[in-house]
Amino acid sequence: MNGRALYLMYAEDVDHSEALRAPLREAHIRRRAELAAQGRVVVSGPLWDSDAAQGDYCGSLLVAAFDSLAQAQAWADADPYARAGIYRRMVVRRINTHFLAQESSP
């Protein structure tokens, strides 16, 4: 991760967010793919509200490397979902990493 710290971005959606997410999904995923192409993403994906094979979206999660909390927060705030008000709540925090798997599998 080139000496960068890891940051957690956890967001909870407003109720019935699927219709709001749909037109912005491509732009949202494209930004995360660009970050991943830089080798900075540890994990990223939508959160579901149940264990069903296909639940309803209820939020987003990202763990990625940034140079500072301010940089991570600015990146999160610029997300299309955040700018559109899809997130009711968003938290960005630095992770004090004690254990990190070198390779992981789902």
Image: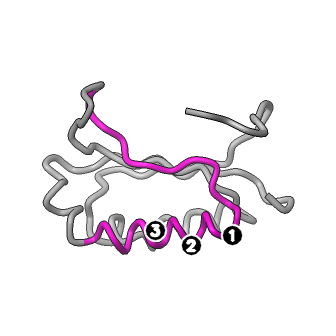
Placement of 24 over or under 15, stated as above or below: below
Q: Give yes or no for contact between labels 1 and 2 (Cβ–Cβ under 8 Å).
A: yes
* Residue assigned mark 1: 38
Residue 77 got which mark? 3
Residue marked by disc 2: 34
Give residue 11's position: percent from left, percent from top: 40, 49
* Nearer to us: label 3 or label 1: 1
Q: Earlier in the sequence, mark 3 or mark 1?
A: 1
Observer-nearest of 11 and 37:
37
Q: Which amino acid does label 1 sit on?
A: Gln
* Of marks 2 and 3, the one in the foreground: 2
Name the residue located 16 percent from the left edge and 46 percent from the top edge: 15
| Residue 84 falls left or right of residue 11 | left
Q: From this view, report whether residue 27 is shown above or below residue 54.
A: below
Amino acid at the residue labelled 3: Asp
Tag 3's secondary structure? Answer: helix
